[in-house]
Image (cartoon, rainbow, N blue to C red):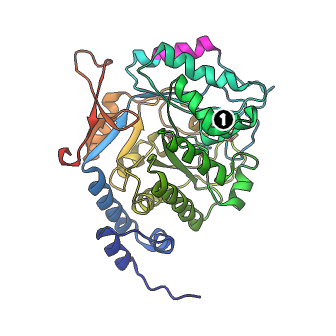
Amino acid sequence: MASIEFTTQSISDKVRSGHRLSLDEGLHLHEHADLFTLGKLANFVREKKNGNVGYYNVNVHLNPTNVCVYRCIFCAFRSDLKDPKAYLMSDEQILHRAKEAEGRGATEMHIVGGLHHQMPYDWYLNIVRIVHNAHPNLHLKAFTAVEWEWFERLTKRPVGDILQEFKEAGLGSLPGGGAEIFNPEVRDIICEHKADTDNWLRIHRAAHNLGLRSNATMLYGHIEKPHHRLEHLEKLRELQDETGGFQTFIPLAFHPENTRMQHITKPSAMVDLRVMAISRIFLDNFQHVKAYWVMMGIKTAQVALSFGADDIDGTVVHEKIYHDAGSDTPQEMTVTEIQRLITEAGRLPVERDTLYNQVLRTEAAPNAFKIGGKLALAQV
Ligand code: V47
Ligand code: SF4
């Protein structure tokens, strides 16, 4: 076995002098550094990139159907076609949600769902088209790489063409879901059949090449091992070197309730913070790392703002994927609550739009907004 010629101290010095970590160095830190050393180092990187800002956004989720041809064993959201819990939203229901979103002052609608056995490609395209036509100021962050790959299968067309068609219909960017864990053996167990790692990366590359930004996620705390996490992060870092198109990385903790992996214990706050910190340190070419409070819980998300995260996502109305899997976080938080929890964590709350431009509002008309520019580090 090769001797290990680094220590936590030597790796920390490397990070502080702005150098990139190798996979082995990242793994060493993830497995051996004590939590506070890891946190301090992640906080160093976080403040270097984003100063004291804690970003949030005002968004709503739309999950147009829970019917899904796939059977990921970590998923509590999906339903069979004939299951009593199966649903499929009508155009009217979708438009009602979009109107409600705009009425609440949302800047973003996050659209993801199941791959319905019977719905054609045009049904998905129509969702983006009708919402965009009725509410052009709402940024549509829609469909994971798994869904885009499904659209390729439905149409037999290349994803570049499909993304272009959706872009013309009003698509704004891509969310980061569907990445799960890139290791093929683990992936085959937890989400057999759906878009594999090469396809997930290929689709994000195609989006970036069209000027569409996207996010990236990693599902942890199930059957993966720490080295699978580092391999996953390394693949994302490589693609980001190539395209620069990722905006935010979001580590997602596995929620076991109502899934086929119910026997697994949900990751502890310690694991959540460790994964958050190593992600921030390792992904040196990602500007943002998000502590998705719906998944982490509000209290851990607050601490995560000092363990690498600079963003806690949004007010998040109508979220189903985590709540079906037993998340006991509230269905939504008001802007005042979000601002309070960021301030309590010692950070400066800044509302952003999906593309990290500052959102400007007045107290007199809080549901109206203007989009400012990007924050310069000197301002924060
Ligand atoms: O891909 C599903 C995960 C993802 C469970 O881009 C689960 O801004 C834990 O990607 N326990 C979808 N995780 C959600 C997602 C996301 C969320 C917030 C923001 C953004 C963004 C993206 O949810 C799926 C899967 O990895 N997931 N079931 C579960 N039981
Ligand atoms: Fe379907 Fe997505 Fe659930 Fe997998 S995670 S079963 S693709 S809805």
Q: Is residue 96 magenta?
A: yes
Q: Nearer the viewer, residue 14 or 308?
A: 14
Q: What residue sits 40% from the left and 81% below the top?
A: 7
Q: Position of residue 319 (x, y in %)?
A: 54, 31
Closer-to-camera residue (314/121): 121
- Identify the residue position indicated by label 1 in the image: 77
Image x and y of residue 171, in percent: 52, 28
Kindly report the secondary structure that dominates the magenta region of the rendered protein: helix
At 78% from the left edge and 31% from the top edge, which residue is drawn? 80
Q: Position of residue 41 (x, y in %)?
A: 33, 65
Is 7 situated above or below 65?
below
User: The N terminus is located in which quarter?
Assistant: bottom right
Frontmost residue, 215 versus 80: 215
Callout 1 environment at 10 Å: few (<14), some (14 to 19), or many (20+)?
many
- The magenta stretch is 90-100
Quick check: is 205 in the magenta stretch?
A: no
Q: Quadrant of ligand 2?
A: top right
